[in-house]
Amino acid sequence: MSARRRRGVTFLEVLIAALIVGTCIASVVSLFDFSFRLTLDSYDQDVAYTLARNALETIKETGFYYTAEAPTTSPVVHYYDRNQANQDSRPSAARYKVAITVVSDRIVAGSNPIKPAEDALRTVTVTVTLLPGSQVLYQGSTYLVRAGI
Amino acid sequence: MRHLDRQIRRQRGGVLISALAFMVVISLLLAGIGTLCVSYYGRARTDSDYAAALSLAEAGVNFEFRKISLDETTADQAGASNPPGVLYNFGGGTFRVYCANRDGSTPWKPPSNLYVIATGTLNGATRTIQVSAKGYAPPGNYAIYTLNSISVWHGSAVVVVGDVGTNGQLDFTGHPGIQGSIYFNGPSAGWYGGLDPGGYTELREPRPIQWETVDQKALDLFPASTYPPGGMAYLATNNDNARATPPIVGNSITNSVTLHGPGNYYVTNINLAGNKTIDLDNTGGPINLWVGPSGGTGTCRFRGGTAALTASQNPSNVCHIYVATKSGIDLAGNQRIDAAIYAYNKDSLGNEYGYVVNSGNPTINGQILANQVDINGNITVNYVPDLIKPTSFGYYGFDNSWVEINGVNQ
């Protein structure tokens, strides 16, 4: 084998090796992107359920009588940024939108604002969406009743 | 030359092997990182479902509270299904709920205290909670309560310090002063003719309030098994009339008399006028004045300026006037009555009766319960708590414990 030929074989090996290494690096970059997005999704999911749970607990603390009626056509909406800081005054800076609806199946006749009847079953639904857009991250519901939990 | 060949052969494999080794290491790293990310994401989703399942379980408990508050007989029971309870779809998931007695046995027997057990399920995440519950007395501090009959009120100088409630209807004329709320309890309750006079705090409860009749009250104190023939019939011949000062003769009071507590006095006739009084000396204990017989038409009348039933000694020993007759009690003087007036009874067919009529200016420190109340004078009623209590609960709700049981992820 001549010295020229022996040098060419080595160059081919380097090319193949470079291809392998390049593929590996591409995979790493790709996985980095994938894991970043997945981690971000997981984080969003965590935050969404924390915000939703907080909203539900706040409503339960407010109680059956004092939680304002909020029909689906005009829910109570709050905005939060990535750090779960309230951004109601600056929705454009928000990453999460928390919409709360409270609907009573029986109300005090003629009440304005609407008051739940003593025997009302009040359905509370909390929906957390990712902004911008309308991807629903979390939706939870519960009931409120007089002397309930 | 041979040495150079061996060196080149070593170089030829070395680069590839190094690259492949690099690839293996990277692949392992990729697999590890990928697994970590995916499991983290899965964990986040599971946590989310787990929280939602708890909300569903709590929803199930509250749902059941409302259901049994409206009607205990519709309670969801454990039944024969496995798992026990009744399944409901709600909020994208399900909850299964049932009631159990406090000792864990099923089915629940209302109106005893109970546990409500609910399981929320969402995307395979399941959580079960057990919440203690009990019945709560109907709301309202009733100075006056009427049951099924229409109550007709007149007079703008009426003063009621306390709540007014009814299972039936109220008809107000002259806008009586009520320093409390008006409760309409049950589907039949409301303003007579639908005419709301306005100006009152009005509350509505879904269930009518149940009260014992005078006959039942008498039987509670003197059951037939121990005191035959029991109840009012027993009282007619076994009472403390002889202990009164002066003794009550012929079950009739027409002159001033002092009743001493503790004691149960029985009369078929009261007719007081002028300055005649019944003094309730409750120093030694509570006093019950029973007016009978059940369904009778005797007189129970307070007329004149100072005819009175006063309890000036010990307010903790409460005094009751139980009126079992259809003719009821007639308050027409300016007397003061320190007692609860209880005029609600039923005949053998279940027809309700019991009547309180007022045309004077009395002051009553107590409570009035009757099937029908007619007020035409300037009565003042000052609510005194806990003189009379209903037999029914107003609603069911949380008692004192909340525990999670059998919490698993499936």
Image (spheres, coloured by chain):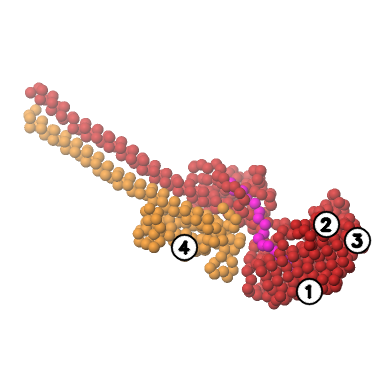
Chain colours: A orange, B red
The spot of residue B69 in percent (x, y) is 64, 56
Of the residues tagged 4 and 3, which is closer to the observer?
3
Residue type at mark 1 is Gly
Secondary structure mostly seen in the magenta stretch: strand
Seen at 54% across and 56% down, the residue is: A143
Residue A86 vertical placement versus A40 (above, below): below
Q: Alpha carbon of mark 1 to alpha carbon of mark 3: how far?
A: 28 Å
Q: For the view shown, which residue lies furthest in the right direction?
A: B250
| Residue under the image location 66 percent in, 69 percent down | B179
What secondary structure is found at the residue carrying circle 3? Answer: loop
> Disc 4 marks which residue?
A75
The answer to whether tags 2 and 3 share a subunit is yes
Alpha-carbon span between mark 2 and mark 4: 62 Å
- Label 3: which residue? B247
Give the amino acid at mark 4. Answer: Pro
Relative to A12, is B221 on the left or the right?
Answer: right
| SS at circle 2 | loop
**Residue holding disc 1:** B360
CA distance separating discs 1 and 2: 28 Å
**In percent of the image, x 35 and y 59: which residue is there?**
A93
Sequence-wise, which precedes: disc 1 or disc 2? 2
Residue named by callout 2: B261
